[in-house]
Image (spheres, rainbow, N blue to C red):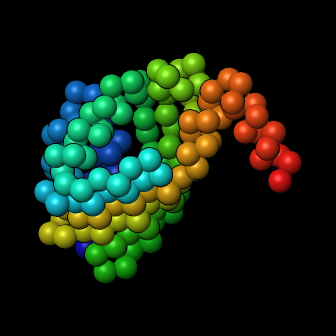
Amino acid sequence: MSDATITRFIENINSLNSNNVNEVLHDTYTQHVNFIDPVKNINGLENLTEYFSHLYKKVNHCHFEINNCLLHDNQYSLEWVMHLQHKNLSKDKPISLNGASFIQYKNGKIQYHRDYYDLGALVYEQIPLLGTVVKKVRSAI
């Protein structure tokens, strides 16, 4: 694996929008990709494309700032901050969320992708009444 491989991935993921999901994902992932995040465990490129198409319908802006990247053989670990504007979250105000990804490549495309992030910070804290409760619980611990 080379720096060009991960650079292409970062460029692709940052170019994603509701109009190009199919094209970008087919350029990035294998047909038999396994994608896992705190919400879903998805097998296959067709299912991943459907999932991302649904997600990106309400995204006004999404950009990943990569803070750290570790390479070992055909595997990458990335630390990132996602900057997101979503029509249904935080009244369309920008959200920044820390996370990490573990990625395995095969023949220049991703065959396994697992994202780690705080789902509560992304979703629950953005709901007015529930967000206040979640934040109070976090501060009490």
Residue 124 placement: quadrant:
top right
Q: Report the front residue among 70 and 39.
A: 39
- In this orientation, does residue 110 appear? no
The residue depicted at 68 percent of the width and 23 percent of the height is 128
Residue 60 horizontal/vertical position (percent): 41, 24
Left/right placement of residue 13 relative to residue 79 reads: left
Residue 94 horizontal/vertical position (percent): 56, 28
Residue 20 placement: quadrant:
top left
Q: Which quadrant is the N terminus positioned in? A: bottom left
- In this orientation, does residue 36 appear? yes
Residue lying at the far right in this picture: please name it: 140
Residue lying at the far bottom in this picture: please name it: 73
The residue depicted at 56 percent of the width and 39 percent of the height is 122
Whether 129 is drawn above or below 41: the answer is above
Residue 108 placement: quadrant:
bottom left
Whether 91 is drawn above or below 70: the answer is above
Residue 104 horizontal/vertical position (percent): 30, 69
Q: Report the front residue among 125 and 3.
A: 125
The residue depicted at 21 percent of the width and 46 percent of the height is 47
Residue 134 horizontal/vertical position (percent): 72, 39
